[in-house]
Every structure is written in structure tokens, then in C-alpha cells.
Amino acid sequence: DGGITQSPKYLFRKEGQNVTLSCEQNLNHDAMYWYRQDPGQGLRLIYYSQIVNDFQKGDIAEGYSVSREKKESFPLTVTSAQKNPTAFYLCASSVGPGPDQPQHFGDGTRLSIL
Amino acid sequence: GENVEQHPSTLSVQEGDSAVIKCTYSDSASNYFPWYKQELGKGPQLIIDIRSNVGEKKDQRIAVTLNKTAKHFSLHITETQPEDSAVYFCAASITGGGADGLTFGKGTHLIIQP
């Protein structure tokens, strides 16, 4: 069954701690994306990657970092520099690069601060 | 950059009636407009999309219309059913403008009253 798997479903972070959110896809998609969703808000783009070993900042990249060492994996690290990390994080992928390619989403990771 | 406004924020309709959600966008270069449905605790699911060379697209009970001159597009759901209850997001993007993801509206919470 092809799809996007995000883990964990819930994550708690202590002050000053970095945490990494996992995103894996078996759809053989080239492009992958990370979005942040806050209550009552739309999704905002954090980072995106068109191909392996390449990624670009989105609208709200400060305090986040990513890597794209494998086609199927695009982990997101929320660093201690992100002062308001509590949110629902969504990973997506699309067949090819380009914002007009339909994006398929995982079921998200909810991050909270202890 | 692109700005997408979505109305209403909450919409309550009787089961069997129609529902209409409207979005406006600011960048006339936008040419791809997807609609997503998000159920509680899940990631958004693409339900229909339209490109700027088309004025209307239909898929069973769901239709999307696009008015490029006025820069607005709408989602129409006919014969609503309880399973249509969810949050719906519109989005816009520009082909060839760099793969920097979609710009989302803030969402409409659709409630189907039995």
C-alpha cells in the first residue's frame, strides 16, 4: 500500500532541545515538502526538496532544518532556535517538482512543548 | 507573494443541501488551484483541482469553478452527506515560478446537520 508515513504521531519537546520528525514515502515521488499547521490557520511551507541532496527554504524556515539523503526520506529537525514550535506538522510529496503537481499528505505529527 | 482568502470560516448546511466555499487569490500568474479535505487528526486529502485553462471541473457531487478575471474560485458540494463534514482548504500556486509549494487559505469548517 503506497503512501506517506509520518512518525511519531505525537512528540513532546523540552525547552532547548532539538527534535526530529520522520517522513517516509514509498510512492517514488521526487518532490517532498514540510508544512506547519496552527489552529484555525492554513498550512505554511517550511522547506521543500525537488530532488535528492537538494532542498530550499519555504516561507517560515527559521528554526528548522532538513536533509534529503534518500529519495524516500525527508526528516525535519525542529531546533531550539524555533521559539514557538507547538503545531501540527505535515509532510507531503508529489510526483515531480513544480507547484502544480498534486501533493499527497501524511497524517501529521503533533509537537508540543513540555 | 501570493495571498489566498477563503470564506466562510464555518458553514453549516442541512444534509442533502448544497454547500459552496469561495476563495480569492492575489497573484494573477497563479494557474493551479487544488482543494483539500482534512478530517480531524488526519492530513489533508486532495479532492479536486483545476488549472487556469479550464473554467469548471466536476467529479460526481463535487465541482470547482474558476473565474480568472475576478481571481476567484469556488468549491461546490451537492447532495451533502454526513461524511462530508470536515475542514476544507483551497490553495493556489504558479507553474514555473519555482517549486515553492502551495499557498493555502485558512480553511472552512463544513458541518452537515442531520
Image (cartoon, rainbow, N blue to C red):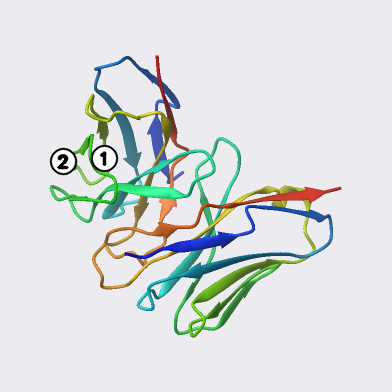
Image coordinates of residue B87 in percent, x first then y, are 61, 49
Residue of label 2: A69
Are discs 1 and 2 located on one and the same chain?
yes
Residue sitting at x 56%, y 52%:
B107
Label 2 neighbourhood size at 10 Å, few (<14), some (14-19), many (20+)? few
Image coordinates of residue B21 in percent, x first then y, are 64, 63
Callout 2: residue from which chain? A
Question: Please, what secondary structure does the residue beneath circle 1 have?
Answer: loop
Q: Is residue A69 above or below residue B112?
A: above
In terms of depth relative to the viewer, which is nearer, A9 or B102? B102
Image coordinates of residue B72 in percent, x first then y, are 53, 74
Residue of label 1: A73
In the image: residue B98, left or right of residue A111: left
Q: Is residue B88 above or below residue A68?
A: below
Label 1 to label 2: alpha-carbon separation: 7 Å
Callout 1: residue from which chain? A
Quarter of image, res B14:
bottom right
| Tag 1 and tag 2, C-beta contact below 8 Å | yes
